[in-house]
């Protein structure tokens, strides 16, 4: 489903602020892979998602999505193939619009626009059923403004919007990091349910090593713009946090110093 081949990206080249964010990344995902990504700050985790999404151009290399070369495809043209949920719950929704209006925008993404007015009865019925799956009672509040929802509710809605059109690839950029622990667990559980039910291919960045082990069928660790560890299947299921710390120390040549991941 995804082939990332020798991708490089340097920000501010030739200046004192030069940063090699990606240094020859190679990554291949099969259809229905659910990959969790861990690594210290500046490891290149979010950068790789931004490269896939087309937020920044890569310096060299190639990105192939389901046989389609998207290396130089503009960001807006990639949106038809991708779903994305950001860390900030406020980013994925329009606060001054109704829940059903937000869903309508997501549902019509990539489709030709006509002159028909408003949201159809069939769309409303579909949105009602989709919202039921969230278990938050939002199906009875479809005309409520999204700005009235809590952070957890907005993130759950964003997740639904990102997967409404069954994307070829779902990108999750620390999408529970800004939520309280209980809400984060609920959103993560919901994320896993949607990915499994819709048989999606997904990449999830997390600073929580326990979550990285618990969710998905595959785990990769990044360090200094490279993939330094890639594990799947039973070996992944049997991992402990101590194993990941040891792997990081081995890859980095020093002790693991990222407090956020240590505390997680």
Image: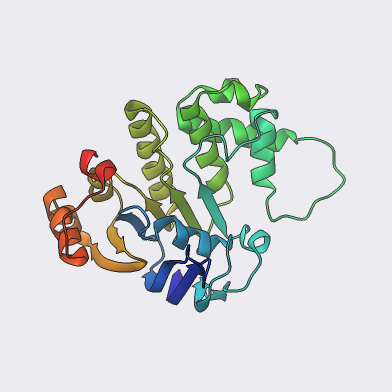
What residue appears at the point 45 percent right and 74 percent down from the top-left corner? 7
What residue appears at the point 25 percent right and 43 percent down from the top-left corner? 259
Would you say 100 lies left or right of 172 here? Answer: right
Would you say 107 lies left or right of 65 here? Answer: right
What residue appears at the point 66 percent right and 31 percent down from the top-left corner? 100
Residue sitting nearer the eye, 154 or 199 = 154
Residue sitting nearer the eye, 157 or 117 = 157
Looking at the rendered image, the quarter that the C terminus falls into is top left
Query: How many circles with numbers are drawn on the protein?
Result: 0
Task: Name the image quarter holding residue 143.
Answer: top right
Q: Is residue 113 above or below residue 184?
A: below
Q: Position of residue 177 (x, y in %)?
A: 39, 38
Q: Position of residue 145 (x, y in %)?
A: 66, 24
Looking at the rendered image, the quarter that the N terminus falls into is bottom left
Q: Position of residue 98 (x, y in %)?
A: 68, 28
Would you say 202 lies left or right of 56 here? Answer: left
Say how the picture is coloured: rainbow
Q: Is residue 152 above or below residue 40?
A: above
Would you say 25 lies left or right of 11 here? Answer: left
Residue sitting nearer the eye, 10 or 229 = 10
Q: Is residue 135 above or below residue 35?
A: above
């Amino acid at each position: 489903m995804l082939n990332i081949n020798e991708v490089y990206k340097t920000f501010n080249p030739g200046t004192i602020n030069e940063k090699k964010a990606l240094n020859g990344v190679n990554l291949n995902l099969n259809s229905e892979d659910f990959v969790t990504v861990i690594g210290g700050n500046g490891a290149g985790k979010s950068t790789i998602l931004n490269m896939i999404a087309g937020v920044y151009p890569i310096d060299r290399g190639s990105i192939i999505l389901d046989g389609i070369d998207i290396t130089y495809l503009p960001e807006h043209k990639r949106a038809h193939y991708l779903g994305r949920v950001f860390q900030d719950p406020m980013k994925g929704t329009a606060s001054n619009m109704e829940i059903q209006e937000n869903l309508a925008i997501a549902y019509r993404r990539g489709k030709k626009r006509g002159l028909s007015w408003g949201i159809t009865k069939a769309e409303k019925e579909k949105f009602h059923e989709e919202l039921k799956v969230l278990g938050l009672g939002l199906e009875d509040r479809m005309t409520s403004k999204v700005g009235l929802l809590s952070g957890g509710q907005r993130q759950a809605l964003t997740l639904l919007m990102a997967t409404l059109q069954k994307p070829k690839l779902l990108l999750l950029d620390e999408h529970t990091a800004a939520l309280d622990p209980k809400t984060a667990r609920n959103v993560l559980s919901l994320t896993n349910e949607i990915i499994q039910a819709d048989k999606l291919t997904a990449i999830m960045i997390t600073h929580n090593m326990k979550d990285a082990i618990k969710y998905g069928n595959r785990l990769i660790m990044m360090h200094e713009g490279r993939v330094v560890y890639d594990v799947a299947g039973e070996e992944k299921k049997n991992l402990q946090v101590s194993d990941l710390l040891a792997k990081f120390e081995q890859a980095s040549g020093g002790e693991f110093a990222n407090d956020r991941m240590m505390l997680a």
